[in-house]
Amino acid sequence: MFTNAQRQVERTGRSGTPRDKYLQDLVTQFQNATDEESKEKIVANLANFAYDPFNYAFMRQLNVLELFLDCITEPNERLVEFGIGGVCNSCVDPANASVIVQCGGIPLVIQCLSSPVRNTVTYALGALYYLCNPSSKKEILKPDVVRIIREYAAAGAVNTSFSNMANAFLDKHVDS
């Protein structure tokens, strides 16, 4: 359920942790974490917060979008999965999408299309759907990328979610 300021007050009460403080604590925990499993859990938690518009400004203030992009560059496939999940969840907001593009996120999202992890591919397709706009089309709609997306679109019998996401992308950005 999406949150608003009133709902947030009701949920946290007088002694609860304000959302911006809670998200800051998660970022600090991630920065101080030494083991991969802790980092994975923290990024997964942050990615879950990334879908709620109430958190968008906090995510930008705390550089969480950049943290997601950094995770995509890691060799740990679970960090990549949760990082691209966070990107996908947050980039529906134009301000977040702009930050992701300005930080060089498009090539990182595109590289996720070749991941062996199904969720990573699905999140990448979703992120590209929202990141593709008049100013980013040239970078996204390269022949190799469109070819890969067309292959996913044709894979309906193998993976319906890939096919549906890819077809939605093609319908909106290529075949229109």
Image: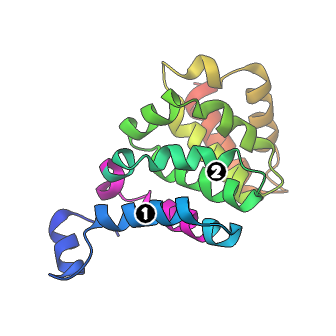
Give the colour scheme shown: rainbow
Give the residue type that dot 2 points to: Cys
Q: Which residue is mark 1?
A: 49
Q: Earlier in the sequence, mark 1 or mark 2?
A: 1
Give the residue type that dot 1 points to: Phe
| Residue 101, image x, y percentages | 52, 30
| Residue 15, image x, y percentages | 19, 83
Quarter of the image for the C terminus: give it: top right
By secondary structure, the bulk of the magenta-drawn segment is best described as: helix
Say if residue 175 shows up in the picture: no
Say if residue 31 shows up in the picture: yes
- Residue at the spot 74% in from the left edge and 38% down from the top edge: 111
Image-based side of 69 in relation to 1, left or right: right
- Residue at the spot 48% in from the left edge and 19% down from the top edge: 134
Q: Examine the rendered structure and indicate whether residue 12 appears above or below residue 172.
A: below
Range of magenta residues:
41-57
Q: Which mark is residue 71?
A: 2
